[in-house]
Image (tube, rainbow, N blue to C red):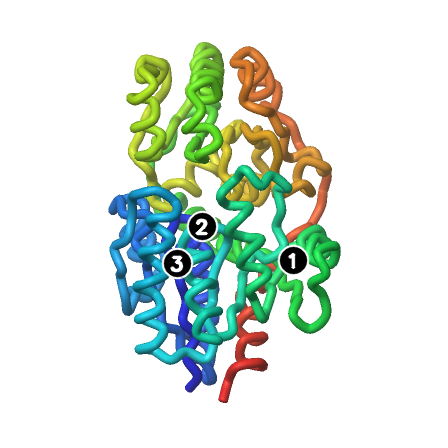
């Protein structure tokens, strides 16, 4: 069997890998070897995903986290090169736009190993975002660009990337939402689902560097959430970095009106997403999960890669500058519904990805 080396390291990648790994397990032509870089090192943000989602345990755990972007990426690059030389894969599969993604793509390119990139073609057009640099460079290096949407495919065409390298497969997050959303529904019927607040509430997630590392934006977001909490409870699974940045900026008191909880396991998060009145986030993945569960979303960023959700009315883009505006938009989204659109494929992206890899790389 041909080996495909899968590189993951952050929460969204675990979710995507759960769907694609099930398709690998059904393949008689490909063997998946998983490497966890360790980029997300908190047990609630990594280990629990493997346990809950049935992802095969990684063959390699590099335990690399912390440090600057350059330090982290450099350490990953060195270790991943050694792993690739040992495994000798037919191709390397990377997901999304993290430092793990870029390190995996660079290491493979240096060793002349073909790269397949899941979620290719996404663009915020903001080169100040580390994620934008990671995704653009990974796309340039990839032999197979697996795009989730028409918009992503067109973005690559504008950059001169087209033809057989580009395969539009749909969004693996939709695959995961269909599978695990159903699993959570079964748990609710059996009364074993995680507890979620009674009545209406806002679910908030904040972690992106452009928000956490700029005190003015951080203050605006959390003052806005505090205003919302006067009307609706705000449940906040608090990312470790966000907690640290709030402490550094002396803004910890802004957490007092909020219901602060530790980072959730994926099934617990899905249960909260399904039950929320509104989701306020700066996460790319959570924007889509809100749509999958028909919950209105307010995205606290200057731009989004998922423009189709803004156009359809499911997502409202709010630059996090003014607390009053943030609060008004979040509360105004309660009960809002967008257009009936199907932008992310048929829920079989994982099978299409593995079939494409088998066609190209199976011996």
Instruction: State the residue position of label 1.
Output: 345
Instruction: State the residue position of label 2.
Output: 98
Q: Cβ–Cβ below 8 Å for labels 3 and 1?
A: no
Q: Position of residue 201 (x, y in %)?
A: 46, 24
Image vertical order of residue 47 relative to residue 306, above or below: below
Badge 3 local density, few (<14 within 10 Å), some, or many (20+)? many
Classify residue 24 as left or right of residue 195: right
Closest to the observer, 109 or 101: 109
N-terminal of the two: label 1 or label 2? 2
Say which element carries label 3: strand
Q: Position of residue 237 (x, y in %)?
A: 36, 32
Identify the residue at horizontal 48%, vertical 21% (top origin). 217
User: How far is disc 3 from disc 2 in space, using C-alphas?
Assistant: 9 Å
N-terminal of the two: label 3 or label 2? 3
Closest to the observer, 113 or 122: 113
Badge 2 local density, few (<14 within 10 Å), some, or many (20+)? many
Identify the residue at horizontal 72%, vertical 65% (top origin). 162
Location of the N terminus (image quadrant): bottom left
User: How far is disc 1 from disc 2 in space, using C-alphas?
Assistant: 24 Å
Q: Nearer the viewer, mark 1 or mark 2?
A: 2
Q: Position of residue 171 (x, y in %)?
A: 58, 56
N-terminal of the two: label 3 or label 1? 3
Image vertical order of residue 118 relative to residue 130, above or below: below
User: How far is disc 3 from disc 1 in space, using C-alphas?
Assistant: 23 Å
Say the numbered circle drawn on residue 8. 3
């Amino acid at each position: 069997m041909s080996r495909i080396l899968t590189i993951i390291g952050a929460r969204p990648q675990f979710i995507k890998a759960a769907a694609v790994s099930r398709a690998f397990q059904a393949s008689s032509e490909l063997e998946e070897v998983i490497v966890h870089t360790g980029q997300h090192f908190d047990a609630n943000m990594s280990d629990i995903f493997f346990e809950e989602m049935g992802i095969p345990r990684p063959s390699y755990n590099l335990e690399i986290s912390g440090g600057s972007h350059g330090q982290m990426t450099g350490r990953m690059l060195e270790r991943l090169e050694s792993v690739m030389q040992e495994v000798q894969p037919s191709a390397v599969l990377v997901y999304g736009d993290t430092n793990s993604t870029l390190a995996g793509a660079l290491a493979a390119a240096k060793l002349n190993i073909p790269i397949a990139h899941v979620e290719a073609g996404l663009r915020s057009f903001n080169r100040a975002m580390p994620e934008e640099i990671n995704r653009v460079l990974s796309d340039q290096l990839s032999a197979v660009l697996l795009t989730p949407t028409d918009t992503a495919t067109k973005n690559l065409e504008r950059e001169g990337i087209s033809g057989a390298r580009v395969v539009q497969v749909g969004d693996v997050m939709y695959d995961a939402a269909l599978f695990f959303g159903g699993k959570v529904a079964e748990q609710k019927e059996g009364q074993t689902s995680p507890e979620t607040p009674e009545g209406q509430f806002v679910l908030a997630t904040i972690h992106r560097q452009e928000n956490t590392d700029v005190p003015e934006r951080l203050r605006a977001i959390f003052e806005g959430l505090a205003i919302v909490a006067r009307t609706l409870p705000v449940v906040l699974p608090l990312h470790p970095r966000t907690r640290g940045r709030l402490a550094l900026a002396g803004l910890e008191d802004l957490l007092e009106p909020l219901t602060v909880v530790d980072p959730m396991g994926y099934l617990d998060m899905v249960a909260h997403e399904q039950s929320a009145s509104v989701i306020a986030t700066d996460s790319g993945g959570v924007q889509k999960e809100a749509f999958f569960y028909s919950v209105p979303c307010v995205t606290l960023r200057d731009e989004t890669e998922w423009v189709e959700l803004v156009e359809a009315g499911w997502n409202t883009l709010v630059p996090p500058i003014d607390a009053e505006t943030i609060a008004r938009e979040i509360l105004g989204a309660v009960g809002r519904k967008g257009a009936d659109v199907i932008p992310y494929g048929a829920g079989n992206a994982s099978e299409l990805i593995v079939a494409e890899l088998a066609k190209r790389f199976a011996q």
